[in-house]
Image (spheres, rainbow, N blue to C red):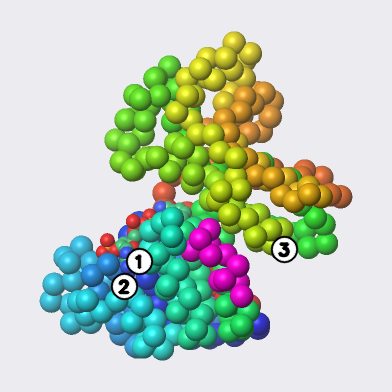
Amino acid sequence: MKTNFTNMKLQIIGLGNVGRSLVDLINKEEKSLDCLGLDLKVVSISDKNGTAIDEDGLDLKTILHHKKRNWSDFSHYHHSYTGLEAIKSVKSDVVVELTPSTNNGEPGLSHIKSAFSERKNVVTANKGPLVASYDELIDLKKKNNVKFLYEATVSAQLPIFCLINSCFIIDQVERIEGIFNATTNFIIGEVESGKTFKTALDYAISAGWAETNYSDDVDGIDSARKLVILSNTIYNSHSRLGDVKIEGIRNIEQIVEEAKKREMKVKLMCTLTNLEKGVQMKVSPKMIPLDDPFATINEGNMGIRYHFKNSQEIFVSAQFNNPIQTAYAVLNDIIKMDQ
Ligand SMILES: NC(=O)c1ccc[n+]([C@@H]2O[C@H](COP(=O)([O-])OP(=O)(O)OC[C@H]3O[C@@H](n4cnc5c(N)ncnc54)[C@H](OP(=O)(O)O)[C@@H]3O)[C@@H](O)[C@H]2O)c1
């Protein structure tokens, strides 16, 4: 669908790390957006407890101040007015869904389905809905003739779908290898520098790299979710999380010790291979030779290598140390809604 917005009305659902960074970024990039001829107005912002609404556009310069003060005395904030209600009742062109990723996809799944039913376009960084209900969402998107972009779901600002869709339109991706989880990459690096897994994990939590609920990361589930999104998007494979062979990093110390003897590095690698009998998806720790570019992906960084049928291999890496990078990927998708 070709859309052209000079005035684009946005609704943001979720004002956590990424939502706040997005608000900061829209403020910071006001002039660049002007140069693109794009007048973005954020008409509603919802968090867990309610929704701030101004159909003429919320003042983004003060919104984070009000959020910090729990919206006290902010007349545009309506307590208990949910994101779902806002999607149904506030006029907008694009819903930006930034609530937490969950196994059943909720609450993001209902937000996205409702936005599509209202014929609103959607941008999201939330993996949950895409892993839980990819086929249903794509059907609904087509039925309602709207756009749905989710570049940030797979490793934040690492260019994946945008690269395949714009640089390799007539070639085919046969295989993808990647380091898609910054937290585990950080922890493995700490174990390589001599820490035990437990100490490295505690350090990663205290340094803000891992959450206290770290199991999705260290057990390889987060990486597996990203593989499912990639596989469904690139190969329309109807893949589910249970189709991924997963091994996490809880036993990483022995592998690191063995790799050191062989002068190799260890990475939690994701692989997606398109075979005649179907796709194959795997997440597991692997020893990597020092001259392989993946060996240079250190700390919380991420990387991807595409093996194309005809073109050469392409390797891309991105530093990741801040949700502002995720917000950049989200803003990029928002801008693409105008194309
Ligand atoms: N952090 C990153 O850099 C990054 C990278 C790639 C993808 N992602 C994905 O992006 C999404 C957002 O991540 P984040 O780090 O910003 O998460 P976060 O800090 O936990 O923030 C989540 C936000 O969602 C709000 N929320 C929760 N339930 C809601 C509901 N039912 N209705 C409306 N709002 C609700 C929360 O409200 P309260 O403020 O009231 O608690 C909070 O503002 C997640 O799905 C994550 O997996 C994040």
> Mark 3 highlights which residue?
166
Instruction: Specify the quadrant that holds the C terminus.
Output: bottom right
Instruction: Name the residue located 65 percent from the left edge and 44 percent from the top edge.
Output: 281
Residue 187: numbered disc? none
Judge the density around disc 2: few (<14), some (14-19), many (≥20) Cα neighbours within 10 Å.
many
Amino acid type shown at disc 2: Ser
Distance, label 1 to label 3, CA atoms, is 30 Å
Judge the density around disc 3: few (<14), some (14-19), many (≥20) Cα neighbours within 10 Å.
few
Whether 57 is among the magenta residues is no
Tell me the magenta residue range: 129-139
Q: CB under 8 Å between callouts 2 and 1? A: yes
Q: Secondary structure at mark 2?
A: strand
CB at disc 2 and ligand 1 closer than 8 Å: yes
Instruction: Name the residue located 18 percent from the left edge and 71 percent from the top edge.
Output: 71
> Mark 2 highlights which residue?
46
Disc nearest the viewer among 1 and 3: 1
Q: Which quarter is ligand 1 in?
A: bottom left
Amino acid type shown at disc 1: Gly
Relative image position of residue 319 (x, y in whole percent) = 52, 43
Amino acid type shown at disc 3: Ser
Q: Nearer the viewer, residue 24 or 144?
A: 144
Instruction: Name the residue located 49 percent from the left edge and 46 percent from the top edge.
Output: 222
Residue 111 visible? yes
CB at disc 1 and ligand 1 closer than 8 Å: yes
